Image: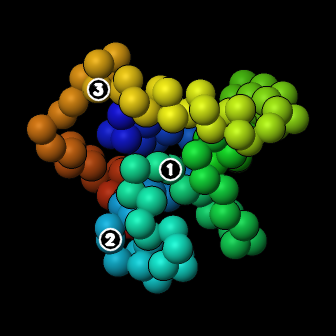
Amino acid sequence: MCNGLVDFLLKADKKEMLKFASLQGDTAKKLLSPDYLDKVDTIIFKTQKGEISIKSRAIIQILITIGGIWKVFAVFSFLPSSFLNRIYDFVAQKRYKWFGKRDQCRIPNPNERERILP
């Protein structure tokens, strides 16, 4: 699902506000504390101000950041993280069944390369 989510966000982020990095890569090691680097099964979002969100909060913050119609997901911000993360974890458990699994990550096209960090 990670590949699918990145594919979706690359298309939905018309203003190209987002950059992407693997949690196993050099960029993550430079930008995140070691506490986050072992969470390779989740999404982590770091704002320009250095604020970090994980799991469901990361998804909501990302959608707010890309703007447009996606800002509507801000309405879920009032729900407790514990509730939203249960939904996030449920989807994460079912992701291969629902979305399939790729054998390898796709290669970014030339327009996307600068947004995919090492």
Q: In the image, is 106 to the left or to the right of 89?
A: left
Residue 47 position within the rendered picture, expressed as x and y whole percent measured from the top left: 68, 63
- Label 2, secondary structure: give it: loop
Give x and y (percent) for residue 41: 40, 50
Whether label 2 touches label 1, CB < 8 Å: no
Amino acid at circle 2: Gly
Would you say 41 lies left or right of 75 here? left
Q: Mark 3 or mark 2: name the one nearer the start of the chain.
A: 2
- Real-space Cα separation, disc 3 to disc 1, in angstroms: 16 Å
74 is higher (above) or lower (below) than 105:
above
Q: Residue furthest bottom?
A: 30
Residue at image location 45% in from the left, 59% down from the top: 39
Which comes sooner in the sequence, label 2 or label 1?
2
User: Residue sitting at 71 percent across and 40 percent down?
Assistant: 82
Could you say which disc has been placed on residue 25 in the image?
A: 2
Q: Quadrant of residue 13?
A: top right
Residue furthest right in the image: 78
Sequence-earlier tag: 3 or 1: 1
Which quadrant is home to the C terminus? bottom left
Mark 3 touches mark 1? (CB < 8 Å): no
Q: Secondary structure at mark 1?
A: loop
- Under tag 3, what secondary structure? helix
Residue bearing mark 1: 43
Kindly indicate the quadrant of the structure image that contains residue 67: top right
Horizontal arrangement in the rendering, residue 25 relative to residue 105 (left or right): right
Crowding near pointer 2: few (<14 within 10 Å), some, many (20+)?
few
- Residue nearest the viewer, comparing 37 with 71: 37
**In the depicted view, which residue is nearer to us: 73 or 42?**
42
Between circles 3 and 2, the one closer to the viewer is 3
To which residue does mark 3 refer? 96
- Residue 7, image x and y in percent? 39, 36
